[in-house]
Image (cartoon, rainbow, N blue to C red):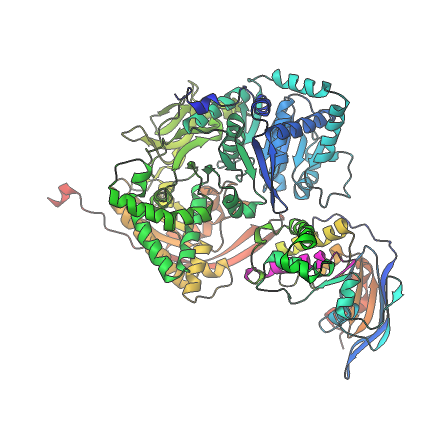
Amino acid sequence: MNMHAAPVAAGETLLSVEDVTLSFGGVKAIRGVSFDIRKGEIRAIIGPNGAGKTSMLNVINGFYHPQGGVITYKGAPRSRMKPHDAAATGIARTFQNVALFKGMTTLDNIMSGRTLQMKTNFFWQLIRGGPALREEVEHRKRVEDIIDFLEIEAIRKTPVGRLPYGLQKRVELGRALAMEPELLLLDEPMAGMNLEEKEDMCRYILDVREEFGTTIALIEHDMGVVMDISDRVVVLNYGEKIADGTPETVQADQDVIDAYLGVPH
Amino acid sequence: MTAASPAAQNQAKGDTFPKLLLDNAATRPDRPAMREKDLGIWRTWTWAEVKDEVMRFALGLEQLGLKEGETVAIIGGNKPRLYWTFMAAQSLGAIPVPVYADAIAEELAFVLDNADCAFAVCQDQEQVDKVLGEQEKLPKLRVAIYDEQRGLRDYDHTHLHAFTTVQEMGAALTHEGPDAAKRWEDKIAAGSPDAPSTILYTSGTTGQSKGVILRAGRAVQAARDTAAFDHLSDADEVLAYLPLAWVGDHYLNYAQGLVCGFCMACPEGSDTVPHDLREIGPTFYFAPPRVFEGLLTNVTIRMEDAGAIKRWLFKKYMAVAKEHGEAILDGKPVGSGARLSYWLGERLIYGPVKNVLGFSRIRVAYTAGEAIGPDLFSFFRSLGINLKQLYGQTEAFLYVTAQKDGEVRPDTVGPAMPGVDLKIADNGEVLFKSPGMFVEYHKAPEKTAEALTEDGYIKTGDAGIFEADGQLKIIDRAKDVGKLEDGRLFAPKYLENKLKFFPEIREAVTYGHDRPFVAAMLNIDLAAVGNWAERNNIAYASYQELAQHPRVAEIIRESVAATNKALADEPMMAGMQIKRFLVLHKELDADDGELTRTQKVRRSFVADRYAPLIDALYGGAEDCFVRTEVTFEDGRRGFIEATVKVHDAETAPVPAMAEAAE
């Protein structure tokens, strides 16, 4: 592929997960998993279906509360937090099944990602005057930067429900970027895309890191993509971590190969 | 000639493009020269500002070592900075060489190598990557410059510079004192009209593309003539959306813009053009027939989805427009009742339709490049849009013939332009000499010799005839006109155009030379047929699946039968009726070499590539399995496999000749 080699991030730890356990009734989704995400890196979480990848993302994002283990974010251990707290501390995410406001335009959807940054009170927003107007112009500028960045000018005013899936994924990424996150969680950003759309998405992910310095954790099934763009990969299987390291080491790991291809009995 | 018209008197003075820039900056400094939509907002530069931007960039280029006579590749879309690069390079006596933005790396390398480019100015990372990837093939390339920085931050910047950095280098000189600016202007004043001004590479319909060297003085003169012909002035406005490397964009927007001092607007991106068109509302517009076709398809589809009252109004007033619209446009006498209906139609239908398409302000619009369907042509003209046809070539620096206001027909391309010497050779080929005609092909004297007759006329390669009123009619490529086995005429293009006038047929390739009968390979139009499929509850997953659907074959069969019927009425063409046809399993694509970059079919290439299908067409088989290699946009290759059905077409009996009936 046409990508230049990503500089391996040697940043400090942004988020670490230690010995995290999550169960739903009797089902153990995650069993004692530990790993870390360093500042400025692209960290992939891979594994076969049902390995606990999305659950892991939901834990990081505050949507699920683990029964055991510690999550440290920006140096401070995190207690029970809600997804909106996670958002306020700079964690944004996209979803496996696109979760946009279908009836709203691309512009409005991305603008909704700015909600947390809006400071003016209800009154000013109601009459759309004074500080609210100034603020809206400022936010619109940021949103336009993102539209330019993702090259979606042509669909600026199109309701997202009418867009093809690949573009919806891109709009969703735009909304996450509008939050100006420090940590961006992407749940299968390439799912259901054709080769060209995948390449575009790879380029956007690399560019997001380069332009905004965002740390990215992503779940992905396309191994070509994972090996190409990520700095480090953690592999889960049946809720357990079976490997962790650079794409090359993970690729050569026997446990990983067994997990994906099965073991002869 | 109209040299004394007020419009012509207001043209900028000078015989090179940089001289025109200086004159525009002096005589109309505050008039808008360029616009670009960026971050959702239209930004405007006046002529004085453009001059300043160009000067800073030119001085920067000079410091990077760009010398007179060297060539500068320009690769990208319609961006103000790339247009400034043309002006900056020309101001230094260097020669800009635009390259198609969607050219694959090999094509790009061919042009850069053939033109000995020392500098390459790229729009973005995509283009920079292509240039850097082919670097070892380009030993003469010294400097690469990019407009948009995104993704390029970590690249080695020894020989790579940002456009803004180069401008800052120039600005540093102008801040020291007025000397640098003075020196730059003196250099422009000393520029010779006999020096090469641009090298434009032909699209390569007939193999490897050739670099057409145009001379500054001739190019400016050609633009002056046509601008006067259509009374263009600095009050006009255009949207520059055609490929930067194509003669059409360079001529209609860049050359005419500099001559007249009108404003050129650059769209936000290639896919936002319809929106941008509506916002700008150009007064002068050019589009190839297929764009008009797309617009009409869109209007039709949207009207089908509209409410009953709107549909009724549309139908009623389009009938009025069809009957009287063109006559009113051409200033012919029309009854007052009809005029009243048309006036109402303008308020209710035509005006809003034109507004949606961005055509409200159009004074002059042209189409060229392919034959345009008579119904399609009339549709736009009947709305009151002054759409005309021209015939031109890169070698002519565009215009050879163009239709005058009020003397417009769909099947001709107009009489010779002022100053153009036009004639038809004994073999039917169109020959001409024109004010803007090229000097030579770059580094290909044998090709230059081939393109010219002994007495200096350019051979167009097109077969044509003059109509009684002096308008030229183009039939086909001269070399493509062939004969069936029984000696009857076979003009493939003529036939293909007739087929393509049906909205559901996007592309047609016909064969018949030295064959017993005519056979056709067709591409369906995914938008039109897709919409039809939706309305008829036909599910499909891909082009391939829809193309082979039996009910699609039925519609296509009807279109082919109608074409045959029309041919039967023309004595010369009756032998060209299509006996067998098939719908191709993939869309013909320039990336696979099946079309040129200007979307023209390469017939013999397609014949070689689909040899098994040709055998099936002539061998009588009912279907045929094919495996085709395809190139994706990133240059990777893959295969498409399909079983293509071959159909028999219904032919029409040729009406008996009068004498035979007696």
Q: Is residue B36 visible?
A: yes
Q: Is residue B501 visible?
A: no
Q: Which residue shows up at 39% across the image and 45% down it?
A: B511
Where is residue B128, by image quadrant?
Answer: top right
Residue A78 in the image: x percent, y percent?
85, 69
Number of callouts in the render?
0
Residue A96 vs residue B425: left or right?
right
Magenta span includes A184: yes
Residue B584 in the image: x percent, y percent?
45, 54
Which residue of the protein is positioned furthest toward the left in this rendering? B662
Residue B582 vs residue A81: left or right?
left
Where is residue B639, by image quadrant?
Answer: bottom right
Residue B232 in the image: x percent, y percent?
46, 29
Q: Is residue B463 above or below residue B133?
A: above
Q: Which residue shows up at 56% across the image and 35% down it?
A: B245
Q: Which residue shows up at 32% across the image and 41% down it?
A: B326
Residue A36 vs residue B321: left or right?
right
The secondary structure making up most of the magenta span is helix
For the record, the magenta segment spans A162-185
Magenta span includes B67: no
Q: Along the line of sight, which residue is nearer the eye, B26 or B231?
A: B26
Q: Is residue B209 above or below residue B648?
A: above
Which residue of the protein is positioned furthest toward the bottom in this rendering? A26
If the image is split into quadrants, where does the C terminus of chain A sit? bottom right
